Image (cartoon, helix red, strand yellow):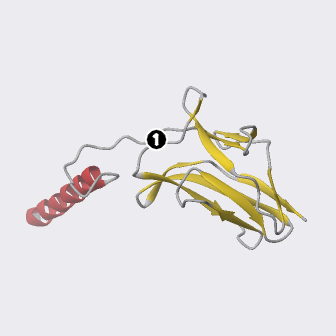
Amino acid sequence: MFSILKKNMTILFIISFIVTFTACSSDDPVAPHEEHFEAIGTVIYDGTGAEIFRILRGVTNDTLLAKVGVLSDHFDVKFINEDEQVVNPPDDDDLSMGIDITNPNLLEIEQDEPGEFEFHLMGLAEGLTTIEIKILHGNHADYRSGLIPVKITN
């Protein structure tokens, strides 16, 4: 009985050690824990530098617009830090931007350089959908914007 308990405790310790020292780190399990880019919101600017969309703590009253068959202007993405200041995207080769589309039958995202913090919208069909902007670190998201409404018209 004691040996089974000792064996289970050893397995639990090993699993805890692995999870603690490998989550969000390099291939070296004893490397120090890496810093994450901290954001509480997202701001999107059009090609002229005008703010066209803002979402803070997952809440917005704004909607992005796209047209069927028309590639939108270039949109730049910035973020809102914990002090509610707009900051540039992270300047770290390990971090990139990802965008999820709720209904890819209505909307397409195009990027000049995949992973860069900029994009274009291309409407595929009229309707409403949402996108979510993520800061990707390896195979997981350090940040998610919350759902961003997109209205596609003809």
Q: Quadrant of residue 111?
A: bottom right
Give me the residue at 65% from left, 63% from top: 110
Q: Residue beneath label 1, please? A: 37
Where residue 17 appears, as percent x and y from the top left, is 22, 53
- Residue at the (65%, 46%) spot, across then down: 76
The quadrant holding residue 114 is: bottom right
Left or right side of 19 for 62? right
Residue 77: where, in percent of width, then height? 62, 45
Q: Position of residue 41 (x, y in %)?
A: 62, 39
Say left or right for 49 vs 24.
right
Q: Residues within 10 Å of mark 1 (few under 14, many from 20)?
A: some
Residue at the outermost left position: 3
Indicate the quadrant containing the C terminus: top left, top right, bottom left or bottom right. Answer: bottom right
Of the residues shown, which amino acid type is indicated by label 1? Answer: Phe
The reply, left or right, for residue 124 in relation to residue 11 is right
Q: Give the x, y percent position of residue 152.
A: 84, 62
Q: Quadrant of the N terminus?
A: bottom left
Relative depth, front residue between 63 and 95: 95
Q: Is residue 86 above or below residue 35?
A: above
Q: Is residue 139 left or right of residue 39?
A: left
Tell me what residue is drawn at x 70 percent, y 52 percent: 74
Q: Which residue occupies 52% across, 57% down?
A: 115
| Secondary structure under the numbered disc 1 in the rendered image | loop
> In the rendered image of this protein, does residue 54 appear above or below residue 118?
above
Extreme residue toward the bottom, this view = 105
